[in-house]
Image (cartoon, grey):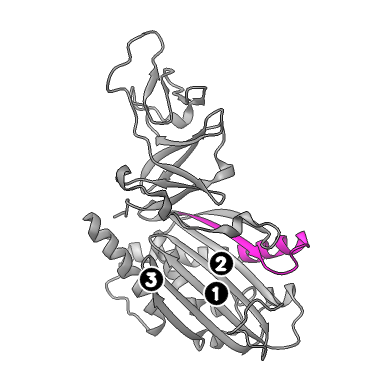
């Protein structure tokens, strides 16, 4: 079911401290923690002695100590202390997972450790640029297959219906948007243009426009579970397609979907505003508005999951706006086939 030879977001970097954090990823129980020197580690959340969760233990100088009988494990998962005996059993170890900290994320690899190449992790420099791209981030737990959240982002014709009071605008504008899709080595890119359209409420509240705007939505899907977005608008007639860096409304979003179980996931997301960068209120307002919109998506997708669990997908039909979604699913199917698992239901 799960694509394992891939990097997933395990946590925001600030979440992981010297207090163990339990998190299920691709249906594996994982414990995340930082040692006293700040090193982050990820181990299977089960002591090799009696199976107690290590997340109920304590971070110590050596690494982590099981809270049940006191066995201690280093960041590699090797047992380094057994209370009451000098000899440590040869098999006393727990599985460790490659973990890499980058751009405010902690990335985890649950597949073959020999294939865990950190140079393939997504670059997202905007998290390191608070001057030009001030940002805030969040985490939602969603009771839905992570692929349904990606489906949602691949077909943006829903925006005018689900998000009418926030980032949406008139549904007709989204349905008739001009869209260009480009396959890539790691997924796909698409850009949608909504020329001479009325700015949606979130945009109009953030920036003073003269009237209608030329609006864009640029997305890049990076398999298996991440999407980078750049959306914005400038006053119509100013050549937005040639120069989107003109004054106007501009935001960058990161969507990181990490499977928890077959029907649940962790949704890591951040908002960065490219306007009024010196005004902290602008960053706060954008975060609240986007958070509200994502909650609207969450309601629909969780209810969608319930119906799919009940009635299945066999009778569903595809329409023209599904082309990016279909391409995305084919990419995941190919990745899954390479690992000998089935991605699609």
Q: Which mark is residue 345?
A: none
| Relative image position of residue 194 (x, y in whole percent) | 57, 86
Q: Is residue 181 positioned above or below 85 on the image? A: below
Query: Where is mark 2, residue-wise?
Result: 296
Residue 268 is one of the magenta-drawn residues: yes
Q: Which residue is at a point 62% across and 74% down the rendered structure image? A: 167
Residue segment shown in magenta: 266-291
Find the distance from the CA under tag 3 to the CA under tag 2: 30 Å
Closer to the eye: label 3 or 2: 3
Query: Where is mark 1, residue-wise?
Result: 162
Indicate left or right for 116 with 62 as reference. Answer: left
Q: Residues within 10 Å of mark 1 (few under 14, many from 20)?
A: some
Mark 2 or mark 3, which is nearer the start of the sequence? 3
Res. 183 visible in picture: yes
Find the distance from the CA under tag 1 to the CA under tag 2: 7 Å
Q: Which mark is residue 184?
A: 3
Q: Which residue is at a point 40% across and 71% down the rendered structure image? A: 188
Please identify the quadrant where the C terminus is shown. Answer: bottom left
Closer to the eye: label 1 or 3: 3
Please identify the quadrant where the N terminus is shown. Answer: bottom left
| Secondary element at image label 2 | helix
| Relative image position of residue 144 (x, y in whole percent) | 42, 59
Say if mark 1 contacts mark 2, CB within 8 Å: yes
| Relative image position of residue 276 (x, y in whole percent) | 75, 67
Q: Is residue 32 positioned above or below 195 on the image? A: above
Mark 3 or mark 1, which is nearer the start of the sequence? 1
């Amino acid at each position: 079911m799960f694509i394992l030879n891939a990097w997933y977001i395990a946590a925001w970097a600030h979440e992981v401290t010297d207090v163990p954090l339990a998190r299920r990823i691709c249906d594996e129980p994982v414990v995340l923690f930082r040692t006293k020197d700040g090193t982050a580690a990820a181990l299977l959340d089960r002591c090799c002695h009696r199976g107690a969760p290590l997340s109920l233990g304590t971070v110590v100088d050596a690494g982590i100590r099981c809270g049940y009988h006191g066995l201690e494990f280093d960041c590699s998962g090797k047992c380094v202390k057994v209370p009451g005996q000098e000899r440590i059993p040869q098999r006393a170890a727990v599985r460790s997972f490659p973990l890499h900290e980058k751009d405010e994320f902690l990335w985890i690899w649950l597949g073959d450790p020999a294939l865990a190449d950190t140079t393939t992790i997504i670059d997202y420099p905007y998290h390191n640029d608070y001057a030009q791209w001030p940002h805030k981030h969040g985490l939602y737990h969603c009771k839905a297959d992570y692929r349904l959240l990606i489906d949602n982002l691949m077909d943006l014709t829903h925006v005018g219906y689900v998000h009418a009071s926030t980032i949406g605008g008139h549904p007709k504008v989204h349905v008739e948007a001009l869209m260009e899709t480009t396959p890539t080595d790691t997924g796909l890119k698409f850009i949608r243009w909504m020329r001479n359209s009325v700015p949606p409420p979130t945009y109009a509240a953030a920036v003073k426009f003269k009237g209608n705007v030329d609006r864009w939505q640029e997305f890049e899907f990076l398999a298996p579970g991440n999407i980078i977005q750049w959306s914005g608008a400038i006053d119509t007639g100013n050549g937005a397609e040639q120069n989107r860096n003109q004054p106007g409304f501009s935001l960058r979003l990161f969507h990181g979907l990490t499977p928890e179980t077959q029907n649940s996931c962790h949704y890591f997301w951040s908002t960065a505003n490219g306007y009024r960068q010196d005004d902290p209120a602008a960053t706060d307002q954008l975060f609240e508005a986007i958070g509200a919109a994502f909650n609207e998506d969450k309601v629909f997708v969780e209810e969608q999951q319930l119906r799919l669990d009940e009635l299945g997908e066999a009778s569903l039909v595809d329409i023209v706006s599904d082309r990016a979604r279909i391409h995305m699913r084919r990419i995941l199917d190919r990745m899954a086939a390479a690992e000998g698992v089935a991605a699609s239901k």
